[in-house]
Image: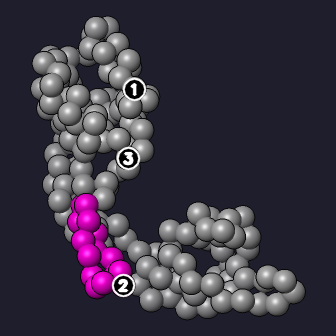
Amino acid sequence: MNDWHVWAITTNKYKRVIEFLEDSVFVEDFLYPLSEKEYNTKKGRRKKMVPIYANYMFIKYEDNLTNTALLKDHPWITQYVGRCSEKEVLEVRALDNSSYDLIIPIAIMDPDTKVKMVRTPFSGWDAYVVSQEGDKLLVSIKIFGGERIIQCKVEDVNVIE
């Protein structure tokens, strides 16, 4: 009996993992759900496909030592996460190719919310939200003895409780 399993994969290697899975006779089905995200560039508005569950691949196969070893030995499949039910996979499949903004909620942060900067040059520094427009934030951070306003994204901060 073939069951769904979740495996962690190396960042930005999903296309190579997909090639491997397509060529593997023991794999019945697999899913790496993507969503369409719009973003602004200097040349205008662009769209790109981004993973819904970054670095997680859903794979349906017969769970035995041989198949598990083949997956573990693949250079870009890093770790077994666990089983997944058919119902859960159907729910994930329903999200596949959806609009990013519809499935990934944007946190609403009130002005003066204290946050910690992450994934920015100021990672680890505390700041305060000044304003928010969509997924963009203006935060106030103390640098060189004075307050400075920095623009970042909602995902670049963690709220300090």
The circle on residue 42 is 2
Could you tell me residue 19's position as x and y percent?
Answer: 20, 33
- Residue extending farthest right: 145
SS label for mark 3: loop
Residue at 82% x, 90% y is 146
What's the CA distance linking mark 1 and mark 2? 37 Å
SS label for mark 2: loop
In the picture of the structure, the residue carrying the numbered disc 3 is: 12
Residue at 47% x, 82% y is 136
What's the CA distance linking mark 3 and mark 2? 24 Å
The circle on residue 104 is none
Residue at 24% x, 55% y is 34
Could you tell me residue 134's position as x and y percent?
Answer: 41, 84
For label 1, the crowd category at 10 Å Cα-Cα, with few meaning under 14, some 14 to 19 and many 20 or more, is few
Q: Quadrant of the C terminus?
A: bottom right
Whether 106 is drawn above or below 90: the answer is below
Whether 32 is drawn above or below 30: the answer is below
Q: Look at the image and tell me whether residue 58 can be seen.
A: no
